Image (cartoon, grey):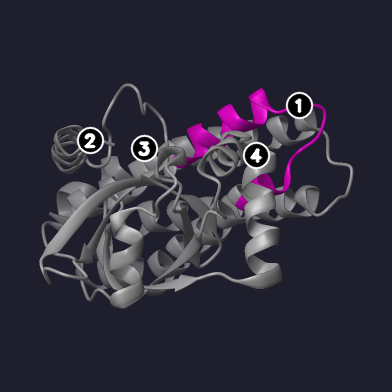
Amino acid sequence: MPIDFNQQIIEKFRANAGEVGAPFEGARLLLLTTIGARTGAPRTTPLGYLPDGDRILIIASAGGSPRHPAWYHNLLANPDVTVEDGVFTYPARAVVLAGEERERVFARAVEADPGWGEYETRSGRALPVVALVPGDAGPPSGPIGDLLKQLHDGFRKELARIRGEVAASGPRVVAQLRVNCLTMCHNLHVHHSHEDNGMLPGLERRYPELAPVLERLRAEHVVVQRLLEQLKTLLGADDVAPEALLSEVDRLIGELEAHLDYEEEQLVPLLN
């Protein structure tokens, strides 16, 4: 992307919690900041990414250019990078995938979006695939209630993306879509576990009168976890049909939306 266009995307991303509008409406975007291999100065680039469990993947396509993008040369020189995802800003370690792992992951990306394969053909080079492994960013700044709302909005957006991907899928569920779903399931489970073990007990000690609210939230966590397990079981089947997956995703969205709305209504004012 041209530098001036990149800067517009960066500014929109930071001003709108990761949302940049057309032509990237609903896309998975991040901001990657590398250290210039020659200049030593930080350089930020907006990039699309693919979920991959505890890490995320980026592909050095450069729009099909025959040359690797500058950010790729930068992280080869210094693999310590900074990632902004619209909610969190955190350090990460860039790992260039090689051999069978690179081939498998790239094939998965092409199966989900043939555009990656077209970029590789046009470029005349093997497009590097890079895993970004998050480091410890420490506690986030700002009002905790606002942060909770941002986290929830992140889950809402990811579920909406996944629903759209499932609805648009062909006669079978491709491997990357399974990974997207499983990554979301894992992240949601971790989030609710942190709430159950940290935030809710803390609120319980400070506000004993909240007991009925917290009891309801814990019960809803159990319901959501049961739906997540059912979704993971379905994804484990070799012949899962998009229609069946869409039904499970809709059930999860319905339960989760109601839960998140209630939690925000009850807790955000107190947490702030």
Q: Are marks 1 and 3 in contact (CB under 8 Å)?
A: no
- What residue is pinned by disc 1? 170
**Disc 3 versus disc 2: distance between alpha carbons?**
40 Å
Counting residues from the N terminus, which is met first, the one under dot 3 or under dot 2?
2
Which label sits on residue 112? 4
Which label sits on residue 204? none
Q: Secondary structure at mark 3?
A: helix
Label 1 neighbourhood size at 10 Å, few (<14), some (14-19), many (20+)? few
Q: Quadrant of the N terminus?
A: top left
Q: Position of residue 48 (x, y in %)?
A: 41, 44
Q: Magenta segment range?
A: 158-179
| In the displayed structure image, the side of residue 132 where residue 144 appears, left or right | left
Asked whether residue 52 is drawn in magenta, I would say no
**Amino acid on which the number 4 mark rests in the picture:** Ala
Label 3 neighbourhood size at 10 Å, few (<14), some (14-19), many (20+)? few
Which label sits on residue 2? 2
Q: Position of residue 177 (x, y in %)?
A: 65, 43
Q: Nearer the viewer, residue 136 or 83?
A: 83
The part of the image, by quadrant, that contains residue 103 is bottom right
Q: Residue at x 70, y 37 (%)?
A: 248
Q: Residue at x 55, y 32 (%)?
A: 254
**Disc 2 versus disc 1: distance between alpha carbons?**
34 Å
| In the displayed structure image, the side of residue 85 where residue 224 appears, left or right | right
**Amino acid on which the number 2 mark rests in the picture:** Pro
**Disc 1 versus disc 4: distance between alpha carbons?**
10 Å
**Disc 2 versus disc 4: distance between alpha carbons?**
26 Å
Counting residues from the N terminus, which is met first, the one under dot 1 or under dot 3?
1
- What residue is pinned by disc 3? 261
Main SS of residues in magenta = helix
Q: Is residue 17 above or below residue 26?
A: below
Asked whether residue 159 is drawn in magenta, I would say yes
